[in-house]
Amino acid sequence: MIYFLENFLRKLRRGLSVSEWAIRHFKLPIPEDARPEKPGLLLIQIDGLARGQFEKALRRGKMPFLKRLLRRQHYELKSFYSGVPSTTPAVQGELFYGVPCVVPSFSFLNRAERRLATMYHPESVKPVEEILQQKGEGLLTGGSSWSNIYCGGATQEESHVCAASIGFGDMMRSKSFFSFIALMLLQIPMVLRTIGLVLFELVLAVWDVIEGVFRHRKQLHRELKFVFNRMFITIGLREVITMGAKIDLARGLPITHLNFLGYDEQAHRRGPGSAFAHWSLRGIDRAIERLFFAAQRSHRRDYQVWIFSDHGQEAVTPFSEIFEGGIEEAVRQGWEHTVKGQKRRKSRVSDRDSRAYWAGGKVARKRLAERSLWEQLTEDENHSFSIAAMGPVGHVYFAQELGIEEKRQFANWLVANAKIPGVLFKTEPGHALWIRRQGELLLPEEAIEVLPHSEKLNEEAARDLVCLCHNEYAGDVILLGWNTDSPPMTFEEERGAHGGPGPNETQGFLLVPENTRFPHTHTSYVRPANLREAALHLLRRKRISRVHRTAPHLRVMTYNVHACLGMDGKISTHRIAQVIERHDPAVIALQELDIHRSRSRTEHQVEMIAHELGMHFHFSPAKAHGEEQYGDAILSKYPLKLIRAENITKAPKVDPEPRGALWVQFEMDGILINLINTHFGLGVRERMSQAMDLLSKKWIGGIELNEPVILCGDFNTFPDTLPYRAFTSRLHDVQLMIPNFRARKTFSTASPVFRIDHIFVSGHFNVHKVQVPRNHLTRIASDHLPLVADLTFDERHLKTVPHLFPEHTAHRTSAESLKR
């Protein structure tokens, strides 16, 4: 009854959904492989938010939804190492295509075209993405890309507000103006919220302009230009890409990636820890919440939601406040003193443009055309040098190639006289030289001791610095605004910056469900290539083998999976496997599984779940009709030996469903353990008869007292009833073995009111922990919640054995495990 009511309400909500209306009205295509059981991924990027700033925002209540994900939805927080350079183009190149350090910074010289490239503009981005496409498959193939640098494998139709594809995708551009008006009218709450937020942001922006001009002595025209950026990127763009991504989720695209730019834009202007930057995080948090539930409600794909930040930012001081004339003047003087001994006309340097132009339009096209002319090298630059310095990493390109000694003299002059923290340049293949005030360092070997991370991460960062120096677009010498013994600085007019190897700029964060499978090479951090492999594994485009971790305890789970039919009407073995994998039990007792039944797409549910988890299994059918079977199973990290599998008592007329039990043995650390899984009937007398049967010598009564026993399953039995008391006369209820622990109910998932799933253990065990995970996934995957217990051994009562199984039967195949 509860299932049918919930399913009805979900269908009603779906029928009234604005996203579904948009799909029908705009005739948006549905992927051919869009099915409820197919996995999907929503990848949300919060641009520029360092892990330290993220944790600060959590403490201050700026991101309450993400805090709830960590506390209630069994998400875990990981460090995300951006690599060096710590910029979005480099991170997304590695994430989308698997190519690290594709560009040396946000701005660089394209020597072939003799123009300064900036990774905000299509003319600069498209050639780079063409190179990436030749080297790797796009992660977003078949999906959509919102507000990114690259399309990432998404088609032109599915790429929106990206640097490589200015404006909205062709599909959205082809729709009439009146269609969009109709869509906005259906989104009245979103429109009103956006208008209110824009007005409020305008008030804050005006105050910020006044403060910037009078307190920080900023130029008025630059402050006024930033007002538009704030309102568009912080509010307008955020709401637009949120609405668009919700439609893509309703369509069932396999992967959708969107990038929230608001925090990064504010942090560059006022600093990563500023109140103005953190103000934008509340709106981003609300947008993520809407997207999270849109992903869970999608009936065309089984989505996971991952949230990450590609890099952080360092609080910096502009170099122009340290050296009069800024970096261009410092380089000019260094060039005159050490390289040519001659004067040069006034030089120029790259500056940051607005990402608001990604939305397209006449103004954007005019600005991009002006920028394209500006990026061409001048005659003076063609005969002397040019500078690309957007942020804390600057590149100096000489018209004529210099030798190692000439570069060393130039670098030493800049460090000693211009107070530049560090200068890099390549030497022999695989090596580079780092000139600092403290002396020279040979990369990568000697940099490991001075970089600000853990030893393992320092090794990786040192290799990344060498890769940076040898990049085809890198300067002849590279200027670093970071050093170990001085505050970080930037070569641009900004208060927050990133691009170098600093501790904050290289450390973003990653929020993923617990026990998400990553490559075995990753340690305490995840870099873009690791995240890419994990995403490909989730989408079943590449497999990462599972590594079973040894634990100090035995984790047992019992779970009635309702034939993998969720409360949303989806049949999904993948979702059940997700629930199990997030809690990483060693053995699992599952009830109500189908094999080759028409109602569940004739799937072999046990084999599919076991294969995805990489586990051994045994299945016991309670009833069978031809090839169609229905019953219970045990999955295990350890090889299993079948002892008994049969029905227990005949079903009475009032409940024609037969009930069974499955008894296996497995060995853990030389200890023989008996595990019995069962599913009792609904009748009072029936359950009592089944309890007596299991306690007889045929089952538990026949097990020696010195052998550990675990009995678990769906007993349809409340505490203090006769069947329950019969079991507790011989065994112990794990939920009552922990002092001051309040027993958790397991049925139903919508509102747990009954405790009918149990784990009983013999006196050989102590209970370390008990969980009944209740989060969005467990509430929707089945009508029961799983029960998980961590058991430890009381070795005084254990009987040890050398080996339970002969060597040739230690790894039973799936086919063999079904033989009775």
Image (cartoon, helix red, strand yellow):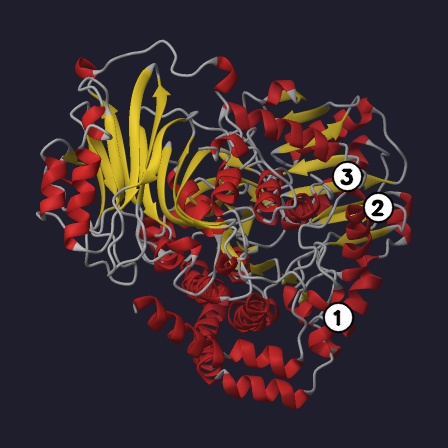
> What secondary structure is found at the residue carrying circle 2?
loop
Label 3 is placed on what type of residue?
Answer: Ala
Question: With 303 as the anchor, is 540 left or right in this view?
Answer: right
Which numbered circle lies on residue 367? 1
> What secondary structure is found at the residue carrying circle 3?
loop
Direction top: furthest residue: 802
Residue 368 locus on image (x, y percent) = 77, 67
Task: Give the mark, 3 or 2, whose residue is nearer the N terminus.
Answer: 2
| Residue 594 in sight in this render | no
Residue 165 locus on image (x, y percent) = 74, 64
**Residue at image point 68% right, 56% down:** 149
For the residues marked 3 and 1, what is the alpha-carbon distance in whole angstroms?
A: 26 Å
**Residue at image point 84% right, 46% down:** 344
Task: Give the mark, 1 or 2, whose residue is nearer the N terminus.
Answer: 2
| Residue bearing mark 3 | 474
Label 1 is placed on what type of residue?
Answer: Arg
Query: If the image is split into quadrants, where does the C terminus sit?
Result: top left
